[in-house]
Image (tube, rainbow, N blue to C red):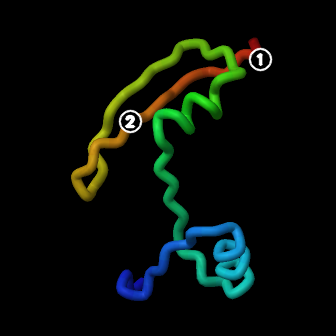
Amino acid sequence: SDKSLAKKVKTREDLKKAIEEEKISRIIKHYTKEEIEAIFSGLKLEKERKTQIMSPSGFTINTLEAIFLNKR
């Protein structure tokens, strides 16, 4: 696909419209540390492993792998 035609989706309304018009090719979401902590705050993790990987474009990506047990 031609990346020059790519357009960022900034609101839920933009996303809904793009889906209806079948204009979605990929969705990327980069979470902040605060967002990640909020998402996982109520969960107990087992075998938690945090790693850093390099994206094809050269950015460092922090990853979290874990088994979710139950809510605390």
Give the percent coordinates (x, y) of residue 53: 31, 38
Quadrant in the rendering for residue 51: top left
**Label 1 environment density (alpha carbons within 10 Å; few <14, some 14–19, many ≥20):** few
- Residue at 50% in and 59% down: 28
- Residue at 22% in and 52% down: 58
Q: Is 64 positioned to the left or the right of 23 in the image?
A: left
- Kindly report the distance in space between the C-alpha atoms of the residues bearing marks 2 and 1: 24 Å
Give the percent coordinates (x, y) of residue 67: 62, 21
Q: Amino acid at mark 1?
A: Lys
Disc 2 is placed on an element classified as: strand
Q: What label does residue 63 carry, if any?
A: none
Q: Which residue is mark 1?
A: 71
Quadrant in the rendering for residue 56: bottom left
Q: Which residue is mark 2?
A: 62
Q: Is 4 positioned to the left or the right of 36 in the image?
A: left
Q: Is 47 positioned to the left or the right of 49 in the image?
A: right
The earlier-in-sequence mark between 2 and 1 is 2
Position of residue 54 relative to residue 25, above or below, is above
- Residue at 44% in and 81% down: 6
Position of residue 15 relative to residue 36, above or below, is below
Position of residue 67 relative to residue 21, above or below, is above
Give the percent coordinates (x, y) of residue 44: 67, 15
Give the percent coordinates (x, y) of residue 68: 67, 21
Disc 1 is placed on an element classified as: strand
Position of residue 66 relative to residue 34, above or below, is above
**Label 2 environment density (alpha carbons within 10 Å; few <14, some 14–19, many ≥20):** few
Q: Quadrant of the C terminus?
A: top right
